[in-house]
């Protein structure tokens, strides 16, 4: 019989708390003490510098050792080679073969490279890796960046053309806002005039074309700015394109709410306001004014404002790209294109200071010498080619031609166009694809479009960094004889039919056949606009916030013509597309540095924007059957959500 006391002793000893082993980290005897005697040591007679404390992390015996030029991977391959030789001599079967694992998952004797006629053995491949050298990626002949080599032709180089806004004309039939200033006691209206722009920069207004003496003229100067295009009410038929020429003066102001700060605000005074119903004349007039303002001589600078002392000195650079192109039908392949980049500058600098601008020019390729505080952050590493560079009179063109340096004396408190140049499109596809099909069957005309975001566009790959397309317009030109079919009587007069989401444009029910047109859209609005002589499909934003990026959007129009004379043999060839993309660039032009002579505390701002304007070819079909878009799209007449 066992003693219960003995059993309890055995049980308690088995559950006895185990002692934790002592850590050596806290053993101060094993820690090497620092030699601090040199700190209190007096300077020697030999002239040793005082307070020469010994660095505990520096081994004096290795101070003369230079970095080894040997490939750091060579020791690994030598060890591998030694192990492989020893294993082949021993010949022991079943040996662990883990050490013979190579980066390439192939047999050592059958490693093949891109050239089919060239086969290297394992040992030759190892020798190549041993001789591996790190090259300079900024060299033009470097293979690390093949897309940046200016000697290589881009895929879109062959499609580069001189597309752009309409050319300058001798004169333009315009409308003048009368009276020019608002008056509560009188109403304003538009009056027809004829406008000319002379080579010396005078804008002349005539009552009609052919008169010799203008009733008003004024000279453009550096303080004049042209406003953004705008659509205004004109008459019962629709709206008119209008633009203003303002005299703009920038001043430094102090504000105290919500907190004290110094701002630079613009004070605008309207000089003249003009309008026209011809969109082509409107664009041609704007381009002529822009060219004249850029070519003004610097001698017209107001010297009374030069030398002002600003409390906050700053410089703002606006880079705007204008894409023009022609796209093929179906796949939206770019047939012709041109990217025109305009660089505007606005400076508030005390005194006369020279400025230098650095672009991502491929002929410079980052070799310019700038201070660290002059470097501007960019989101691209691409280098671009500049074509047909045109500069303001304040730029030293000879220095740019010889050294590719943009050096200029900016106009004080005045926004001006510093330079413009052409370049190729930086993407392979546009932000969205648009396919348009039209059919004419007897007196029936059908038109349909499919719009979808392009996955190949760089901004569309990541939804978190995606840049939206804003103010999207797709214009389908319509003959003048068809306009009456797109208008209806209302209480206030004639009004254009308008199609919205879940609301089709028609006089009555869509099931009742008649001569009334029917339009449907799955996103945005569509109606006939007299200012463009087209059916305009407008979308505020793409991609839509309430639909996926891969979701297609449709436009459909069905028209039954009333007489045989109105039936055409074919539809127009192209449809026009326009939209804006903020904070983006079509050419990938980037401001890499902004330098101001003798100043380091200047605030610097860079703004990017892009405007796209191109034509898409329309597919001419006998009928819009359900298989126009393949299996992804149903009946064309049912593309809208009812």
Image (spheres, rainbow, N blue to C red):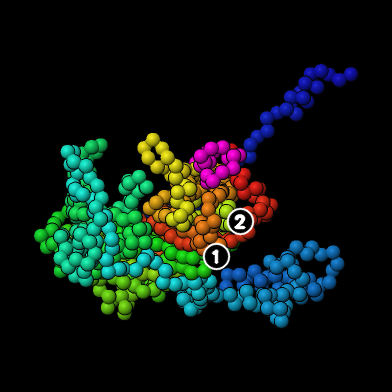
In the picture of the structure, the residue carrying the numbered disc 2 is 441
Per the rendered image, the range of residues in magenta is 500-517
* Residue 182 seen from this side: yes
Q: Nearer the viewer, residue 464 or 15?
A: 464
Residue 168 on the magenta segment: no
The residue at 41%/72% (across/down) is 162
Locate residue 484, reporting x and y percent.
45, 49
Q: Which quadrant does the C terminus fall into?
A: top right
- Quarter residue 127 falls in: bottom right
**Mark 1 or mark 2, which is nearer the start of the sequence?**
1
> Which dot, 2 or 1, sits closer to the camera?
2
Locate residue 148, reporting x and y percent.
48, 72
Q: Which quadrant does the N terminus fall into?
A: top right
Report whether 347 appears left or right of 479.
left
Report whether 454 appears left or right of 374.
right
Image marks 2 and 1: residues in contact by CB distance under 8 Å: no
Residue 512 on the magenta segment: yes
Q: How many marks?
A: 2
Q: Nearer the viewer, residue 181 or 312?
A: 181
In the picture of the structure, the residue carrying the numbered disc 1 is 328
Q: Main secondary structure of the magenta part?
A: loop
The residue at 53%/53% (across/down) is 563
* Residue 549 seen from this side: no
How far apart are the two marked residues, 2 and 1, measured between alpha carbons? 24 Å
Locate residue 539, reporting x and y percent.
47, 47
Within 10 Å of disc 1 (Cα), the crowding (few <14, some 14-19, many 20+) is: some
Q: Nearer the viewer, residue 29 or 400?
A: 400
């Amino acid at each position: 019989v066992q003693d219960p006391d003995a059993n309890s002793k055995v049980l308690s000893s088995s559950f006895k708390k185990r002692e934790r082993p002592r850590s050596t980290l806290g053993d101060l005897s094993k820690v090497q003490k620092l030699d601090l005697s040199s700190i209190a040591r007096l300077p020697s007679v030999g002239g040793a510098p005082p307070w020469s404390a010994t660095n505990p992390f520096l081994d004096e015996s290795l101070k003369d050792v230079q970095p080894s030029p040997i490939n750091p991977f060579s020791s690994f391959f030598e060890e591998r080679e030694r192990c492989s030789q020893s294993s082949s001599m021993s010949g022991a079967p079943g040996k662990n073969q883990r050490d013979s694992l190579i980066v390439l998952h192939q047999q050592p004797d059958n490693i093949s490279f891109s050239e089919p006629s060239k086969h290297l053995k394992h040992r030759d491949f190892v020798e190549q890796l041993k001789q591996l050298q790190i090259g300079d990626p900024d060299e033009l002949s470097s293979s690390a960046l093949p897309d940046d080599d200016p000697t290589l032709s881009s895929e879109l180089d062959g499609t580069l053309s001189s597309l752009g806004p309409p050319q300058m004309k001798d004169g333009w039939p315009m409308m003048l806002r009368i009276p020019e200033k608002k008056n509560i006691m009188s109403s304003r209206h538009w009056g027809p005039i004829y406008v000319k722009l002379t080579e010396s920069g005078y804008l002349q207004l005539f009552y009609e074309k052919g008169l010799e003496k203008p009733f008003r003229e004024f000279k453009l100067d550096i303080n004049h700015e042209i406003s953004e295009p705008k659509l205004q009410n004109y008459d019962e038929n629709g709206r008119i394109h209008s633009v203003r020429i303002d005299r703009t003066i920038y001043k430094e102001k102090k504000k105290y709410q919500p907190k004290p700060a110094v701002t630079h605000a613009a004070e605008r005074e309207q000089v003249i306001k003009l309008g026209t119903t011809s969109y082509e004349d409107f664009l041609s007039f704007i381009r002529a004014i822009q060219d004249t303002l850029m070519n003004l001589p610097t001698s017209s600078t107001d010297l009374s404002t030069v030398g002002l002392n600003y409390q906050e000195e700053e410089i703002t650079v606006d880079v705007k790209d204008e894409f023009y192109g022609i796209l093929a039908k179906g796949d939206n392949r770019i047939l012709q294109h041109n990217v025109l980049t305009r660089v505007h500058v606005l400076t508030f600098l005390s005194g006369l200071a020279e400025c230098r601008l650095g672009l991502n020019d491929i002929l410079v390729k980052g070799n310019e010498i700038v201070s660290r505080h002059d470097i501007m952050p960019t989101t691209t590493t691409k280098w671009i080619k500049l074509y047909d560079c045109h500069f303001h009179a304040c730029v030293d063109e000879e220095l740019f031609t010889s050294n590719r340096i943009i050096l200029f004396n900016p106009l004080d408190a005045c926004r001006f166009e510093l330079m413009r140049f052409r370049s190729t499109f930086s993407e392979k596809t546009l932000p969205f694809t648009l396919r348009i099909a039209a059919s004419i069957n007897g007196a029936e005309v059908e038109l349909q479009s499919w719009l979808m975001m392009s996955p190949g566009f760089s901004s569309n790959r990541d939804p978190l960094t995606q840049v939206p397309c804003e103010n999207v317009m797709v214009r389908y030109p319509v003959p003048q004889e068809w306009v009456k079919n797109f208008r209806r009587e209302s209480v206030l007069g004639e009004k254009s039919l308008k199609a919205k989401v879940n609301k089709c444009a028609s006089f009555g029910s869509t099931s009742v056949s008649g001569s009334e047109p029917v339009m449907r859209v799955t996103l945005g609005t569509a109606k006939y606009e007299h200012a463009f002589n087209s059916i305009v499909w407008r979308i505020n934003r793409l991609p839509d916030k309430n639909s996926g990026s891969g979701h297609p959007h449709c436009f459909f129009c069905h028209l039954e013509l009333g007489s045989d004379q109105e039936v055409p043999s074919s539809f127009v060839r192209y449809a026009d597309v326009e939209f804006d993309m903020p904070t983006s660039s079509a050419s990938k032009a980037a401001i890499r540095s902004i330098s101001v002579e003798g100043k380091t505390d200047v605030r610097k701002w860079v703004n990017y924007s892009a405007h796209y304007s191109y034509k898409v070819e329309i597919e001419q079909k006998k009928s819009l059957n359900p298989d126009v878009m393949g299996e992804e799209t149903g009946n064309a007449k049912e593309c809208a959500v009812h």
